[in-house]
Amino acid sequence: MAKGAGSVAPGPLGGDRRSSRIEAQAALILGLVEEKSDITLAEIQIELARAGVAAGIGTIWRFFDRRRMTCKKRRRTLPSKIARTS
């Protein structure tokens, strides 16, 4: 039975229905990262707020995760041959 007006059939379940709001700001976010490569998620959140977009830290993190972009803040060290480095 097709879902229509007055139908008791359930709607679609699961899936992402909210990422389109942050994805619409992709040019702004990626531009911020290009300008300042060590920008923090909190700084990106502030810049989005200035542009009138409310976004949580988790939302911004998932934006980068979908693109498989990581922002490691740790220094790179040479691997130790005798001890764990981290």
Image (spheres, rainbow, N blue to C red):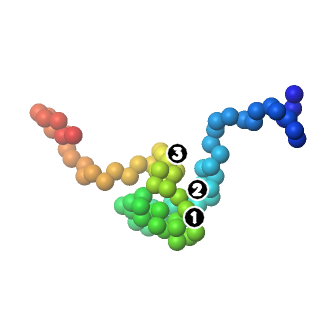
In terms of depth relative to the viewer, which is nearer, 39 or 53? Answer: 53
- Mark drawn on residue 17: none
In terms of depth relative to the viewer, which is nearer, 61 or 37? Answer: 61
The residue located at (49%, 68%) in the rendering is 47
The three-letter code of the residue at mark 1 reads Val
Locate residue 23 relative to residue 1 in the image: left or right: left
The residue located at (27%, 51%) in the rendering is 74
- Toward the top, the furthest residue is 1
Q: Point out the image quarter for the C terminus.
A: top left
Q: Are marks 3 and 1 in contact (CB under 8 Å)?
A: no
Please rate how many residues cluster around mark 1, counting C-alpha atoms within 10 Å: few if below 14, some from 14 to 19, many from 20: some
Report the residue marked by disc 2. Answer: 22
The three-letter code of the residue at mark 3 reads Arg
Confirm whether residue 37 shows in the render. Answer: no
Q: Are marks 1 and 2 in contact (CB under 8 Å)?
A: yes
The three-letter code of the residue at mark 2 reads Ile
Q: Residue 26: horizontal and vertical position, in percent?
A: 57, 58
Locate residue 58 relative to residue 12 in the image: left or right: left
Please rate how many residues cluster around mark 3, counting C-alpha atoms within 10 Å: few if below 14, some from 14 to 19, many from 20: few
The residue located at (82%, 33%) in the rendering is 8
Q: CA distance from mark 3 to mark 1?
A: 19 Å
Q: Nearer the viewer, mark 3 or mark 2?
A: 2
Q: Secondary structure at mark 1?
A: loop
Q: Earlier in the sequence, mark 3 or mark 1?
A: 1
Q: Earlier in the sequence, mark 3 or mark 2?
A: 2
Residue 35's image quarter? bottom left
Locate residue 50 relative to residue 18 in the image: left or right: left
Q: Secondary structure at mark 3?
A: helix
